Amino acid sequence: MTIAGFTVRVLSGCVASYDPKNLPLILAYCQKKGCEVKTLGEDNGSQMNGA
């Protein structure tokens, strides 16, 4: 998903819920809406550096 020229990413390890069993549903919802869901290891920050 791109908004105003920015790629929207959700780092899965930075998402919380009062019930951890809901996390897969929350992440699936984010993906359904067009966000890239990544782990911290997958997102090396290269986009942030303009590379």
Image (cartoon, rainbow, N blue to C red):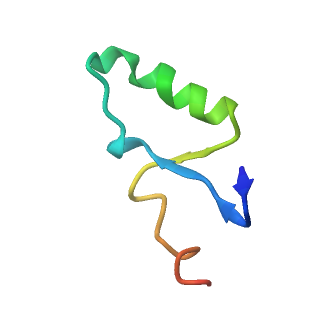
Q: Which residue ends up furthest to the left in the rendered image?
A: 18
In the image, taking residue 19 as reference, residue 29 lies left or right, namely right
In the image, taking residue 7 as reference, residue 27 lies left or right, namely left
Q: Which residue ends up furthest to the front in the rendered image?
A: 4
Picture layout, residue 6 above or below residue 40 = below
Between 46 and 1, the residue placed more toward the observer is: 1
Image x and y of residue 49, in percent: 53, 83
Using the rendered view, name the quadrant where residue 34 is placed: top right
Image x and y of residue 22, in percent: 39, 17
For the point 63% across and 35% down, the residue is 31
Between 40 and 35, the residue placed more toward the observer is: 35
Between 2 and 44, the residue placed more toward the observer is: 2
For the point 34% across and 15% down, the residue is 21
For the point 46% across and 69% down, the residue is 44
Image x and y of residue 12, in percent: 41, 42
Using the rendered view, name the quadrant where residue 51 is placed: bottom right
For the point 58% across and 74% down, the residue is 47
The number of callouts visible is: 0
Picture layout, residue 40 above or below residue 24 = below
